Image (cartoon, coloured by chain):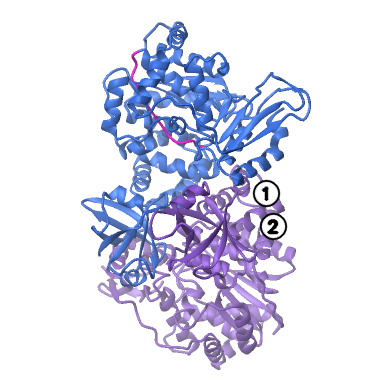
Chain colours: A purple, B blue
């Protein structure tokens, strides 16, 4: 049936459409049914809500997400038909019951997620199935292939390198520093990041405090041609777009399965043509993975690297303590700037880790011989070439280095007695920053005044919570009261 | 923040609210955040969409589901605040990781589902956790308790009996016949049903073709006082309302876990005060459960019966073939009427099964001695006392026995060669009826002209598919072409 688009100026975070109850009846559609909306060979599936007002009988009210996907505007006509219940729901159930999926079956699920044929609830079923029943290397390979093939690709000349941390360490904003060093050394580093999953900020969230991160693929090619590198949000590019949809739902319950983790990382790297990839696996107490899990994960990365013809190196780093002082998009960015600008009081752990990883990449891509990478990295950082490179990239991304503000409300947390800090828990610190509003509220978060090994006196400031609303600050404070004894030992 | 209700006349199948982008900013709310909406001590949690038009800055646009739950109307003021991420998400993850949940933890999850603090995606995570990791008898007991306590109860005098089939058999609409017989024998049978889960119709879906099934608790008490029985949809009553929310999401992927099945059945029975309960477990080839699974399930029912002080009897019936000729709400109702009205051509399998089960209930509730139940049931059916009782109940529910129409479009499926039917597959027959539009389209479904053992000639009609739209009929036909060789052997 041909229906006229009514732009609702509605942002629902997913495609949402509404039609008049009478139109629904005439199409024998019910609330919760799926419809296919077509325009010029583009097709999107959406779940239907019915209304009695707002929308006229020959209209379909759509959220901004639909306008964008179909490239349609107000008053355009689109073809709307009832959509079949996708067969991939049965495949998801098959996985949930413990069976392996074939290449074709995984492809079907992933392409159905791509065109929105599966609702968020169904994607949640898929995520849980993979989380609980796991996938072997073959299934993971198919998952990566399908994610890459259902999205766009970037073609770049030169030695393309990348790094990825599997995350879980609070703070730990090494990427902007590493990219600046490597790009200054002549390597091509098209850094696409997703939003934070289980941590308080992702690189995209942090960079966004100073520059744009949403660019088209041609824009990115220009930025990289000019500067050798970029920091962009992957979601806007349609590189393995299914990964972003999955991550959005994983975030809800902080569910992060190994196959999905591997696929998420490698599909993005393959889509931008990276050949030399350094994987950082922080492990230890309160990190995402234990030492043994890290070993298992490293094995899988190397196996998948071979399958896809990539030069992958995996290093385990100490992930038992937060790195840097700030936790939250802007607070982490402040740390990054202090390291790059060679501020004497910059967080030394962040500096040291960034130099180590940058050195490894310089070696992996054969810029220098094995053993000489870190020396070159130090040289580039100390000479402020990295700072200049960072500035250059921000400029190319329509931004610049600025003094970042803090969130509106804050609360200092003080030590209740003299102590020496033995440990700060990553998971609790991250969770605290999230409750304070991260990563959506960019200036919110937690600033650590003290770190492991520091001697603290009664009434010394331990950390400060920043938040954009009194409610969130209160929620964070309540959480803090509950957990502080486990957070800071 | 106080916001003015703007009624959107929107039906989304779940609570949905929208606020202006500027209002969202001032409250530091983001798309997908949860808000608490309060009015007169009632509280509902909803996920926020933001808009630029339609809704003014001091307004909150709400779906009909919210108006109903909060008993508010257009232009009322409500209190809207950011809602904390519920702790029960962590508990769901705990279950997903294989841990047992305590009474308190299960209570927290169920009460959070009740007041909508958990989104559909989170409920999907809970459903999968229970499906994959199972629950022991203690956890199932807590689940039932929490479901009962988070809902309303009905208090009735007399010997309250109930029956329940765990389903999976296509057709099989025994309930209206059994209830009519038992009520005619003087037993109290407050039959509350959910909508169809994995089958093409539930009792509520079928009864709705001739009478109302949505009543308030005082209404039901009146209906039962007059007639001894009722056939109502449980969802409208708020008896174990969480069960309905869970079923709605389970339906999406046909995921039906044992603990949830036990809790769903028993929580409803306990909420209406049933003491004598007959559980029918159809098993065998193409039924929901195998013989062994049926044994396990029976054991659990009896254990739970003891915990809650109920007299439960479980019988296994042959569930390998569809029962009756019609599959779909109205088509099954036609079979029921033909049995009750003593039509000579009524489906004998449906009649026989109904009499057997009714007899068991008469014995369980000690109306007659063991061994004499079926005789009394036959007497009541043959004398048309059951038909009159059914008519009486329909009248009390503002309906009457009518000649039901068929869906607009139909397609006959013919035998391609001479054969004797060895088996008709329940799962495929059900799925076919669902694709044709069941249970939402009440007159859609499948009518079986032939059953197991029938001799069929080439070009004889095997069955007819009914559908309300050409598209659905086409989808059903496509499915039929794919599966007919497995469906009819």
Q: Residue A101 carries which label?
A: 1
- Residue at 53% in and 29% down: B331
The residue range painted magenta reads: B186-197
A277 sits left or right of B134 in the view: right
Please provide percent x and percent y for residue B251.
51, 42
In the foreground, B245 or A475: B245
Q: Does residue B169 show up?
A: no
Task: Find residue A1 and report its image quarter.
Answer: bottom right
Q: Is residue B193 magenta?
A: yes
Q: Is residue A458 magenta?
A: no
Looking at the image, which residue sits at the far bottom?
A383
- Residue at 42% in and 49% down: B13
A35 sits left or right of B122 in the view: right
Q: How many marks?
A: 2
**Vertical relation: A390 (above or below) A295:** below
Please provide percent x and percent y for residue B112.
35, 48
Check disc 1: other Cα within 10 Å, few if <14, some if 14-19, many if 20+.
some
Check disc 2: other Cα within 10 Å, few if <14, some if 14-19, many if 20+.
many
> Cβ–Cβ below 8 Å for labels 2 and 1?
yes
Q: Residue A142 carries which label?
A: 2
Q: Which of marks 2 and 1 is nearer the N terminus?
A: 1
Q: Does residue A92 show up?
A: yes
Mark 1 belongs to which subunit? A
Please provide percent x and percent y for residue B252.
52, 45
């Amino acid at each position: 049936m041909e229906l006229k688009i009514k732009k609702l100026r509605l942002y629902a975070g997913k495609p949402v459409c509404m039609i008049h109850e009478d139109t629904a009846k005439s199409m024998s559609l019910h609330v919760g049914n799926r419809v296919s909306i077509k325009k010029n060979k583009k097709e999107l599936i959406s779940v239907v809500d019915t209304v009695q007002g707002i929308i006229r009988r020959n209209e379909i009210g759509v959220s901004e997400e639909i306008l964008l996907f179909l490239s349609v505007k107000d008053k355009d006509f689109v073809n709307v038909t009832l959509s079949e219940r996708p067969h991939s729901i049965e495949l998801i159930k098959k996985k949930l019951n413990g069976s392996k999926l074939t290449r074709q079956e995984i492809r079907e699920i992933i392409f159905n997620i791509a065109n929105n044929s599966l609702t968020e609830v169904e994607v949640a079923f898929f995520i849980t199935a993979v989380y609980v029943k796991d996938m072997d290397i073959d299934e993971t390979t198919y998952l990566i292939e399908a994610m890459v093939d259902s999205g766009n690709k970037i073609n770049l000349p030169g030695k393309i390198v990348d790094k990825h941390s599997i995350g879980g360490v609070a703070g730990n904003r090494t990427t902007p520093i590493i990219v600046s060093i490597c790009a200054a050394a002549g390597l091509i580093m098209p850094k696409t990041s997703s939003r934070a999953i289980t941590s308080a900020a992702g690189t995209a969230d942090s960079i966004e405090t100073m520059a744009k991160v949403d660019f088209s693929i041609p824009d990115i090619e220009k930025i990289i041609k000019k500067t050798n590198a970029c920091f962009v949000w992957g979601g806007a590019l349609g590189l393995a777009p299914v990964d972003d949809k999955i991550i959005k739902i994983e975030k809800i319950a902080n569910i992060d399965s190994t196959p999905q983790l591997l696929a998420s990382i490698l599909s993005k790297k393959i889509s931008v043509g990276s050949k030399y990839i350094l994987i950082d696996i922080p492990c230890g107490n309160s990190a995402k993975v234990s030492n043994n899990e890290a070993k298992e994960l490293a094995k899988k990365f190397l196996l998948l690297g071979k399958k896809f013809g990539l030069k992958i190196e995996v290093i385990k780093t100490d992930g038992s303590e937060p790195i840097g002082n700030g936790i939250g998009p802007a607070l982490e960015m402040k740390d990054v700037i202090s390291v790059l600008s060679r501020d004497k009081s910059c967080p030394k752990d962040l500096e040291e880790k960034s130099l180590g990883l940058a050195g490894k990449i310089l070696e992996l891509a054969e810029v220098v011989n094995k053993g000489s990478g870190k020396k070159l990295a130090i040289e580039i950082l100390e000479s402020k070439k990295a700072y200049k490179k960072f500035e250059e990239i921000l400029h190319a991304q329509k931004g610049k280095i600025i003094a970042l503000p803090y969130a509106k409300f804050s609360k200092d947390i003080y030590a209740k007695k003299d102590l020496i800090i033995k440990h700060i828990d990553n998971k609790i610190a991250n969770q605290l920053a999230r409750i304070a509003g991260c990563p959506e509220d960019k200036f919110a978060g937690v600033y650590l005044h003290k770190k492991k090994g520091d001697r603290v006196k009664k009434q010394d400031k331990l950390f400060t919570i920043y938040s954009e609303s009194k409610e969130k600050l209160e929620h964070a404070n309540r959480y803090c009261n509950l957990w502080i004894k486990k957070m800071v030992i």
